[in-house]
Image (cartoon, helix red, strand yellow):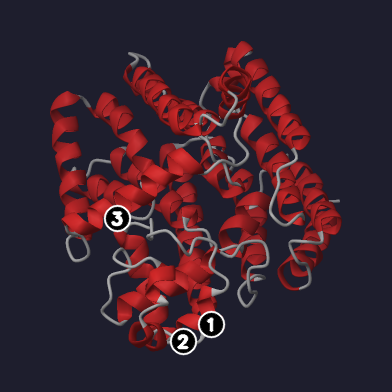
Amino acid sequence: MNKLWLGLSVLLYVVLAYFLERQQILLLLSVWGMLFVGYFFLIKEEANYLVFAGVVFRLIWLFATPALSDDFYRFAWDGRLLINDFNPFQYIPADLMQMPKIASQINAEELFQSLNSPNYYSVYPPLNQYLFGLASFISGNNLQLNVILLRVIILLAEGGTLWLLHKIKTEQKLKISIAVYALNPLVIIELTGNLHFEAVVIFFLILTYYLLTTKTALWKPALALASAVCVKMLPLIFLPLIVNKIGWKKGITFGFLVGLFCVLYSFPLLNLEIIQNISVSVNLYFKSFEFNASVYYVVREIGFWIYGYNIIGFAGRALSIIAFLLIMYVSFRKSSGSIVLPTAAAILTIYLLFATTVHPWYITPLVLVSCFTNLRYALAWSALIPLTYFSYTTIPYKENLWLVGLEYSVVFGLLIWEIYNKKRLLMRV
């Protein structure tokens, strides 16, 4: 039966990678659904060949152009700016199109029409920018080659993650279900397929965890965490938990080292003006962007009843403050230092449930943590969150709140059930 599911999965990934478009929603979700049915059958077995199968599923996408995400156009845009000695944090794409000399130098017309955020400064941190620049340096203005090179970077990161999971499992004698991550269709499609750099973040996060559990110099895990932060800023939310784990004395040193490495990564690109530009974009994220939220959508509806308009400007910031306080509480609980990975799952869950925007790839780090625990709500979430692609079947894009309600009803229900059955929160040891 497993061989049948593996063979069918290969066929389905080929169809997804090379023959489907985002607008073919029913066919798209049917294929995705069949992949998840196979996934839930396959992860019941612990076998090394399943991890190998996960590698094969990722390699299928090597030459595919992402059909479900257009973020890669911005990656190429920023990369071309960087290799032509223009700071990607300094120019709004729409403004740059009014500068013919620069626009022609980066072949901007090819990319501009496909950008999904032409009126915003780039929000991708420095290490991410360097990776974009590396791909653009090699590919020049060849967009297809750029996509392949970006995917090679992500494949290397994913390979590193699977290798580290195996290393942790064998060295620390943990009952890690590597296949939970290796075979997860959401992880494969959104990271390798759609070129989201959460793959690189996940690699550096699991590297941070591995280094913290071995007797090694403190600067090494600090560099790993700083690298994760300089790809996406989200990993900063784990710093309080790490301080709790290693103690305040080491924790302060660790935090200083993380900050120092982040400054070193950022130094070539940042100045006061650039920091202000980035702040504008980050501020807009909390005040303007909303997609597939849970708690925020409830608060938004209450705001409409009371005030008669969308209160995202206030609610986005208020919820982020509440999430921060909850994360600090969870991180510094006395027991958190001894159950790091279940606590990391709790931190990620708090962040996601209070966020105003939750794209499918945002939950992939939570899937990784599921390898170490008996928590399964994240896997159910990964199977349901592709329903958000229904939003892209209309122009302008419009969410189906019934589907959002279905998604979070199942996620909250399963989460509450797993919390009630506390044994399911324990490490797989």
At mark 1, the secondary structure is helix
Q: Amino acid at mark 3?
A: Asn
Between marks 2 and 3, how big is the CA–CA gap?
26 Å
Taking depth in this image into account, of 145 and 224 the one nearest to the observer is 145
Disc sitting over residue 62 in the figure: none
Looking at the image, residue 265 lies above or below residue 258:
below
Crowding at dot 3, Cα within 10 Å, few <14 / some 14-19 / many 20+, comes out as: many
Q: Position of residue 116 (x, y in %)?
A: 55, 62
Q: Which residue is disc 3 drawn over?
A: 277
Q: Which residue is disc 2 drawn over?
A: 141
Q: Position of residue 271 (x, y in %)?
A: 17, 59
Say whether disc 3 or disc 1 marks the residue closer to the N-terminus: 1
Looking at the image, residue 204 lies above or below residue 256:
below
Q: Position of residue 198 (x, y in %)?
A: 48, 53
Q: Amino acid at mark 1?
A: Glu
Disc sitting over residue 110 in the figure: 1
Say whether marks 2 and 3 touch (CB < 8 Å): no
Say whether marks 1 and 2 touch (CB < 8 Å): yes
Rendering quarter of residue 28: bottom right
Between marks 3 and 1, how big is the CA–CA gap?
25 Å
Say whether disc 1 or disc 2 marks the residue closer to the N-terminus: 1
Say whether disc 2 or disc 3 marks the residue closer to the N-terminus: 2
At mark 3, the secondary structure is helix
